[in-house]
Amino acid sequence: MRILHIGKYYPPYAGGMEIFLRDLLKAHKKEGLDAAGLVHHHLPGRSSLKEEIEGVQVFRASSLGQILYVPISLSFPLVLRKIIRSFRPQLLHLHFPNPSAFWSLAVSEARAVPWVIQWQSDVVPSTIDRRLQTAYRCYRPLEQRMLKRSEKILVASKPYLNHSIPLKPWASKCVVAPLGVDPERLPWPEADALQQAERSWQPGLRVLAVGRLTYYKGFDVLIRAAGRTHGVAVQIVGDGNLRAHLQTEIRQKGLENRVLLRGGLSNVMLQALFATCHVFCLPSLERTEAFGVVLLEAMRYGKPIVVSDIPGSGPGWVVKEGDCGWRVPPGDVDALAAQLKNLAANPELCRELGRKGRENFKMKFQIQSVARGIKGIYEEILAGKSGS
């Protein structure tokens, strides 16, 4: 069975969608599928290219950069047509949101095979970045045409499906299929890396946060909560357009010794921080944070989690399913500070919840079981097509 995945980016670009795509393609290979990925080049101005990464074919279409978080690629439809003609996929697996996937409507070769849509998140009409509300008016008609044309729509959690306005007309096509991660990608760090990570932490409750420094992640909420709680040390890993703003907030609150912006780190160093932290925190503000693959990584390392319980979104559901942490109202600095203070005083509670999370990760969120379920959906679709 040949499957072509169409996504936004692919590692080394760091993001939840990209990490999931990488892990899923690798797991598909283990399941005996011939799977390839078409994405944008993460470095603007680079030529389109084909790579083999961990035994998987990855095609990167040249990109001019981003506008409103959207990659712009004039070559994408040409690359899409060329790959379909050479790879001859039996099914397209489209990862949304991704406006370049709309080219599938215009490319006859793409229309000739069935589609599965991986619904990573709605395009949320943000109250923080209001430009997205205007852009979505143009995006929605094409989005709805894609949903109508698809055979199945995979949604990562039941709460997200229940609250998704774009998916309501297509509920009969939707299947809840949780995301997963590859534990082989997350080994226990070597002693040297662990020692380096240990030295990087200040005394107190060690709180790790990971993600792009962008508008919906809520890292400013975490910084302010740390400022109201003694005995808490925070490290935030990731980069993005809000780095200068967050650094200014840290400096103004006199938290330079307790809150560190680490920027982008190597996988080895990030894994060492996961291994040596006491608590993982995801303080996101909006449903743009649809699931939080990084939460599964924290569970893999046996770390308890504090998340914003965003109405109609996945992070709170992940923590509940994993029985691995605590939920606080999004944007509530006082509630987050109170929870961090409670955890600082109860290290044994942290260890117990971390242990439960690790066990539930093994049962529910390993990528191989997720890939096996998706393979079954592919087989059902193709069997229906051959019998019609």
Image (spheres, rainbow, N blue to C red):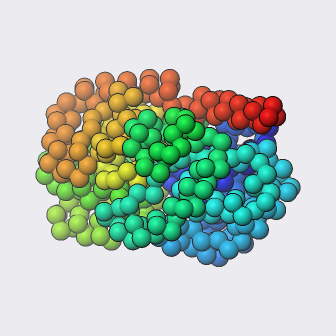
**Residue 315 vertical position relative to residue 358 in the rendered view, above or below:** below
**x then y, percent, for residue 318:** 40, 35
Q: Nearer the viewer, residue 219 or 119?
A: 119
**Residue 82 in the figure: left or right of residue 119:** right
| Residue 60 seen in this snapshot | no
Q: Position of residue 253 (x, y in %)?
A: 16, 63
Q: Quadrant of the N terminus?
A: top right
Q: From the viewer's perspective, is 15 left or right of 306? A: right
Q: Residue at x 20, y 60 (%)?
A: 255
Residue located at (54% from left, 50% from top): 17
Q: Could you tell me which residue is drawn at 24 percent across and 41 percent down? A: 328
Q: Which part of the image, by quadrant, shows the C terminus?
A: top right
Please state the horizontal and vertical placement of residue 343, each as a whole percent of the image. Answer: 21, 35
Q: Is residue 164 left or right of residue 74?
A: left
Choose between 220 and 373: the one closer to the eye.
Answer: 373
Q: Give the total of numbered labels.
A: 0
The reply, left or right, for residue 264 in relation to residue 311 is right
Which residue appears farthest toward the right when viewing the image? 86
274 lies above or below 7:
above
Is residue 167 in view?
Answer: yes
Residue beneath the point at 70% across and 59% down: 104
Residue nearer the viewer, 41 or 155: 155
Q: Determine whether 129 is above or below 267 in the image.
A: below
State which quadrant residue 177 falls in: top right
**In x, y percent, where is residue 270?**
46, 48
